[in-house]
Amino acid sequence: MSESLKLDNVTLAYDTPEGLTPVVQSLSMSLERGNIGCLLGASGCGKTTVLRAIAGFEPLRSGSISLGDACLSEVSWQREPELRNVGMMFQDYALFPHLTVEKNIAFGLRKWEKSRRKQRVSELLTLTGLSGSEHRYPHELSGGQQQRVALARALAPEPDLLLLDEPFSNLDVDTRERLAFEVRDILKKTGHTALLVTHNQAEAFAIADRIGVMQQGRIVQWDTPHGLHQHPANEFVADFIKRETLMALRAQAYLRGGNP
């Protein structure tokens, strides 16, 4: 497979009254075309800031970001977000409440010829299991259905890269895990390259081909789910995986009415 997304020695920081506060430090990673990657870590580790930088919303303090053969960001220059051909799916879905499912999905296709736009929306309705719901409004849908609309809208313009920012966090545990598998299946069918950000290990292991465990603005280990479980790079990764697995088992026991 050819390399699609590459971050090379990326440093990100915020301006504060005390000066620059580093958030991400010397981060490097690459993701092959058609693969699903995940940045996994606790709140405040810098994972969402990385996603925002890839989307073009945060300037780089060092390093570069490229997608295929195109440079997206360097220290002295960055391509405008709307010119990156990068789709983004937000935590709160960000659907337009006054637009139907069909019009939400078609929102980014306004410059497309009408028949082509209609065909693309129809394809995505079928792909995401939303056929028959095209004339409904977001408030008439379940959380899982809203999530599928948001995914369909993000995929509609055929982006080179899809970014997913904690996309399942507003859903209950059972729906979250089921939809994580569904999203993976959809992305594998379309062949899209995607990068997910989450603090939930179950989501990461359900959807990702490669996972980067983050700690204090750095990727501690970038590996397959199997590699993280079987060959943790250090004690932090081993403890993180073990702790998250134990928490998931306790949550499942609680939901079943057992003793957590």
Image (cartoon, helix red, strand yellow):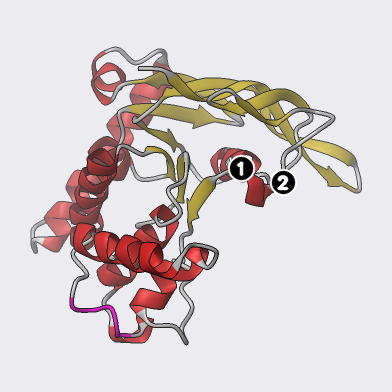
Marks 2 and 1, how far apart at CA: 7 Å
Viewer can see residue 169: no
> Which quarter of the image is occupied by the N terminus?
top left
Tag of residue 84: 1
Q: Residue at x 38, y 62 (%)?
A: 116
Q: Amino acid at mark 2?
A: Glu
Q: Residue at x 34, y 16 (%)?
A: 232
Residue 204 higher or lower than 100, as above or below:
above
Q: Which residue is mark 2?
A: 80
Give left or right: position of 68 versus 52.
Answer: left
Residue 142 higher or lower than 110, as above or below:
below
Which of the pair 206/23 is nearer the observer? 206
Per the image, is 134 magenta?
yes
> Magenta-highlighted stretch: main secondary structure?
loop
Per the image, is 201 magenta?
no
Residue 136 higher or lower than 183, as above or below:
below
Q: Residue at x 47, y 87 (%)?
A: 98
Residue stretch rendered in magenta on the structure: 132-136
Classify residue 238 by image quadrant.
top left
Residue 90 in the image, given as x and y percentages of width and height: 48, 59
Say what secondary structure mark 2 lies in.
loop
Number of marks in the rendered image: 2
* Contact between labelled residues 1 and 2, with CB atoms less than 8 Å apart: yes
Residue 231 in the image, given as x and y percentages of width and height: 29, 12
Which of the pair 163/165 is nearer the observer? 163
Say what secondary structure mark 1 lies in.
loop
Mark 2 Cα within 10 Å, few/some/many (few <14, many 20+)?
few
Viewer can see residue 78: yes
Give left or right: position of 124 versus 44.
Answer: left
Classify residue 140 by image quadrant.
bottom left
